[in-house]
Image: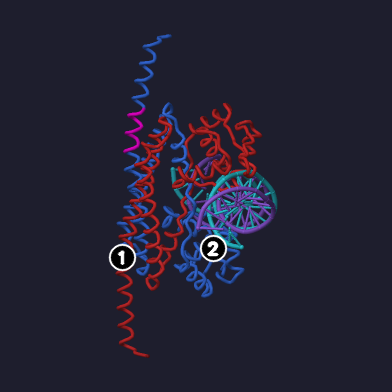
Chain colours: A red, B blue, C purple, D cyan
Amino acid sequence: MRTARTTPFALLGMLSLGALSGYDLRRELSETAGTFWSESYGQIYPALRELSRKGLTRRHAARRPGGPARYLYEITPKGRDTLRRWLAEPPRVAPPRNELLLKLFFSDRDAVDAPALWARALLAEETERLRHVRRMKEQLPRGPHHQRSIRFWMMTLEYVERQSEATVAWCQRTISTLDLMQEALARRRTAAQRRSPLE
Amino acid sequence: MRTARTTPFALLGMLSLGALSGYDLRRELSETAGTFWSESYGQIYPALRELSRKGLTRRHAARRPGGPARYLYEITPKGRDTLRRWLAEPPRVAPPRNELLLKLFFSDRDAVDAPALWARALLAEETERLRHVRRMKEQLPRGPHHQRSIRFWMMTLEYVERQSEATVAWCQRTISTLDLMQEALARRRTAAQRRSPLE
DNA sequence: CCATACATGTAAAGGGTTACATGATTAA
DNA sequence: TTAATCATGTAACCCTTTACATGTATGG
């Protein structure tokens, strides 16, 4: 079985909360679910056409005065039904692929600088993500959101928060280990130089 | 810029620890790095041919008596150099795609059963992964491994361990929340039935 | 006899990103 | 004037998995 495409369902999901344009869809998705899902225009526009062809959405021209062409997509009852059935199926898990860990795995004791840099970059990134998620968690109950889905939204935020916390903790520990390794390397090099002082 | 392929480098990395066949490569990769990296034969065999064509590996016939055709791949100095340069470049992060969270995000208060099932399945899976990683962490210092890389290997295991712990904790919390929601739903349904007892 | 492990490899198909093309409006 | 935002859409290309084809040996 080929892995079924999920893009159309992600779009149906967003449209089940209200009609949106292709541009809106990407923005809304990245603002609300951006920490665990992403879509690009190259996926969105063809998928919207396909959804409308299948009668799962309906397209309405919605150009704003003085603005560029714009279309709103509305979910149909058939679309809601398709979404509901997809939601009931078990989620598929992607095979793991973490390039940072792969590089770390093959790294050499004599080249500690690069991993130390990446760990610091990841720490900065992840600290920012954590701040972002916690802000969202605070604002969520006060936001203009569907009461029915707040609990589920909160669960996704908590997932990301916990993963992020774990990553931050790992970065801190790993950075200090790498720093120690770097010092040890420097000492070895100094010792080697003392034994054969060429310059 | 197109995303550079990482499969050849993953293979070079494994081969930098010793000559292996295509079949071995997949087994070794999944045994040592399987928690954060995966490769399929459909990637491995074409990549090995390409590596040999570029002079980064050398192929030797190594058929075992009475066995099927078998070839060992050995990394060349040029291959080591290419690997070293790749290791120095910053790792790329994949855009996030977590289908479980996506489904949870779009779930409805009236359909809590499915998410509860998935959370339980994930808890079982992740508990097992955690056991596996901890066993590896214990065995690592006693194993017949390259002393130079043990520290790095340990870092990758610690990363996976922390992520896994975070996931387990999230599952437990989420399952209890979902169970409460399920009870509330049942109460609402009973109440509705009392108001209009049809059967 | 059948399933599994060993072992190499191809073909098809789908999933996804990036870059590009196009063009209006607004703010610096 | 330049950059950013709004807005739709296409084409190229790559990455990856899955299914299949082929065959030997071993253990239950």
What label does residue A177 carry, if any? 1
Question: Which image quadrant for residue A123?
Answer: bottom left
**Badge 1 density bin: few <14, some 14–19, many ≥20, Cα 10 Å:** some
Amino acid type, callout 1: Thr
What label does residue B8 carry, if any? 2
Helix, strand or loop at disc 2? Answer: helix
Q: Decide: is B86 above or below A156.
A: below
Chain ID at mark 2: B
Outermost bottom residue:
A198
Locate residue A9, reporting x and y percent: 54, 37
Question: Which image quadrant for residue B194?
Answer: top left
Residue A170: in magenta span: no
Residue B174: in magenta span: yes
> Is A37 positioned to the left or the right of B195 in the image?
right
**Badge 2 density bin: few <14, some 14–19, many ≥20, Cα 10 Å:** some
Q: Decide: is B109 above or below B146.
A: above
**Residues rendered magenta in the picture:** B173-181
Q: Nearer the viewer, residue B48 or A175?
A: A175
Q: Residue at x 49, y 72 (%)?
A: B80
